[in-house]
Image: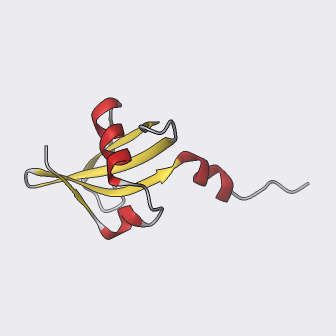
Amino acid sequence: MPITYAGSAHKHQVPHDSIWYVLMTVESVPHETDWGEAGLWYVGPDNRGITLEIGTVRRGRNEMVYHAMPLSDRHNHEPKETK
């Protein structure tokens, strides 16, 4: 499966080999993107042991990565609860 990358896939500077590793070793979960396309979601460790979340959509013969982020980034940016 040829893999392409949207500009948004580079936002968190995840290396392409780490993305590829997760795509090849983790089972995907189907989901609908915000723009109504059928996509695949992957969450799992890369070749460095860092857990990534990756979102893809099918574009022709290619699987286009539109989101790639370390899962720890999501937890570091969630609003903190206030008392």
In this picture, residue 8 sits left or right of residue 57 = right
Residue 12 place in picture, x, y as percent: 48, 62
**Looking at the rendering, in which quadrant would you find the C terminus?**
bottom right
- Indicate how the structure is coloured in the image: secondary structure
Q: Residue at image x 28%, y 34%?
A: 24
In which quarter of the view is residue 80 placed? bottom right
Q: Residue at image x 55%, y 46%?
A: 71
Residue sticking out furthest to the bottom: 7
In this picture, residue 61 sits left or right of residue 3 = left
In this picture, residue 11 sits left or right of residue 33 = right
Nearer to the camera, 14 or 69: 14
In this picture, residue 49 sits left or right of residue 75 = left
Q: Residue at image x 47%, y 39%?
A: 48
Residue 82 place in picture, x, y as percent: 86, 57
Q: Residue at image x 36%, y 59%?
A: 34
Nearer to the camera, 32 or 66: 66
Number of numbered discs: 0
Residue sticking out furthest to the right: 83
Nearer to the camera, 31 or 23: 23
Residue 79 place in picture, x, y as percent: 72, 59
In which quarter of the view is residue 67 placed? bottom left
Against 9, residue 2 (above or below) is: above
Residue sticking out furthest to the left: 61
Nearer to the camera, 12 or 80: 12
Residue 14 place in picture, x, y as percent: 43, 56
Against 43, residue 66 (above or below) is: below
**Looking at the rendering, in which quadrant would you find the N terminus?**
top left
